[in-house]
Amino acid sequence: MGIDLIVKSSPSAIDFAILKNGKLTELHREEIGAKFNVGDIFLAKTAKVMPGLNAAFIDLKSKKHGFLHYHDLGPNVRSLLKFVKQLRTSKGKTDHKLRDFTFEPPIPKDGTINHVLQQGQPVLVQVVKEPISTKGPRLTSELSIAGRYLVLVPFNERIFVSGKIENEREKSRLKRLASSIKPKNFGLIVRTAAEGKKVAELDKDLQNLMSRWEEMTKKTANSRKLPVKVLSESGRIKALLRDLLNDTFQSIVVDDKNLFNDIAETVREIAPGKEKIVKLYVDSLPVFEKYDIERQIKTSFGKTVSLGKGAYLIIEHTEAMHVIDVNSGVSKDKNADQESTALEVNLKAAEEIARQLRLRDMGGIIIVDFIDMKKKENRDKLYKFLKEQMSDDRAKHKILPPTKFGLIQITRQRVRPERNIKTTEPEPGNGEVEAPVKLLEKIENDLQEVMNETKGKVILGVHPFIASYLTQGLFSWKWKKMWQYKRRLDIQPRHGFRYLEYRFFDKEGNEVYLD
């Protein structure tokens, strides 16, 4: 499976899309100068301590204070607070490598926050969830700095190996290598990308992480006006490359020269020799148009998502959860029974739902109402297939088995606001209409059904503006469809039709009604 990363730059933001075999699977935006990104570390003051919530509000000079719960302090938060105090009083002379640092006793699991933090106290916090809706950023004081192969965890002595590495011998080997290079008073998490790597590669990654930790401690020591960002996550594109870049990447296409140089350098550091896959896009056609991303955005976002053959998803959003309803179309296989048709549509829906969750970055509780299936083996098959489709989703998630009514509940980690892209466009006059590309998709789906249900010539009646578009050029949409179905197709302009109205007629001029 080939992966392409397409990057579009603008003065206000950087948009980047991940394509798998040409199909849009993830869409991200990095706002230029964004105040909060997951992974950022701030030195800030405690604004309020709330024993009733067992949490503290941290002043980050934003609309809403950051939220720090007792359980997110980390067991060694007292050691962290002591280190911060030493840094700020010694003006950076404290050893950042923690070689002679004496740990404080860990806090109890069931303790209360007012015994740990006081109002006005400086504390290092890391963003684990960006501001969403009316809520401020969710914070932790259990700091971690992520690299390509390792994650550095200060004030910790433990070593963890990614659970996604299944080979026990490899896990033991990596744990042994990590133990041999682990600095005193630091913990390490060995990431999935470290599988098969040598100790020299792990050590190089560790030295980079220690350099970032040193940079952070210097800023912490010298900062007097709080809050201050003392360590920035490297940016979503760089973090994405750090986490995903492997041999399945075919190309990284960038439409900005400076960004191209920056990304090429990042790839050179992460995977020497692969920087040749980074390409500068210089065509006059916008890069998202060139790679068919704009069309896929228009057809993938919105309340209704087509699955083909008349089947579709309805995606509803509420304050508490997301609800996805799976609807079947009319089966083209006259011999297919209801159960097999339901299974076919459900499997196709599961594949698209896994894509939609990543594409929209939907989080929280998701309830999916699949088409009812009587046979338990079919429900089990659907459950297993959905888990496989979501296996490469980087967000933490849990999928519960289907109920006898066909409902499946999914919980998915939410660390930033959901992508919500408007797919309607202003209508001449008043109101709004669906984007033209969505109308075209509907016409194509219905045309397939008409071609299966009728013989001979088919007539499509549409608004004159739409008729002009469908017949424009030598290799027009009309010509391509006649070639596809080996049938005659006439496009009939109808001045009495609304912009989005269309109807099909057979060769005698009788309207073809669709279920």
Image: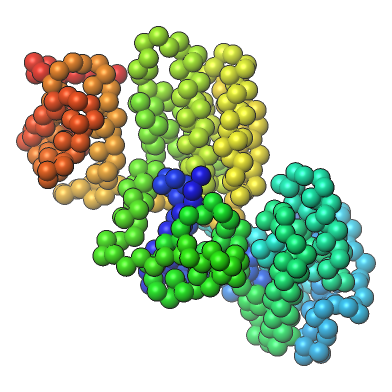
Its colouring scheme is rainbow
Examine the rendered structure and indicate whether residue 375 appears above or below residue 304: above
| Left or right: 366 in relation to 338 | right
| Left or right: 199 in relation to 251 | right
Q: Residue at x 90, y 64 (%)?
A: 106
Image quarter for residue 401? Answer: top right
Examine the rendered structure and indicate whether residue 42 appears above or below residue 364: below
Q: Quick one: quadrant of the C terminus?
A: top left
Q: Residue at x 63, y 76 (%)?
A: 229
Closest to the observer: 125 or 117? 125
Q: Residue at x 74, y 74 (%)?
A: 207
| Left or right: 386 in relation to 475 | right
Residue 217 picture location, percent across and down:
74, 80
Task: Decide if residue 143 is in sight here.
Answer: no
Image quarter for residue 186? Answer: bottom right
Examine the rendered structure and indicate whether residue 416 appears above or below residue 260: above
Closest to the observer: 223 or 152? 152
Circle count = 0
Task: Decide if residue 291 is in sight here.
Answer: yes
Closest to the observer: 202 or 69? 202
Image quarter for residue 149? Answer: bottom right
Residue 203 picture location, percent across and down:
76, 69
Examine the rendered structure and indicate whether residue 201 appears above or below residue 88: above
Q: Residue at x 66, y 71 (%)?
A: 41
Closest to the observer: 5 or 390? 5
Residue 338 picture location, percent across and down:
46, 12
Residue 481 picture location, percent across and down:
21, 32
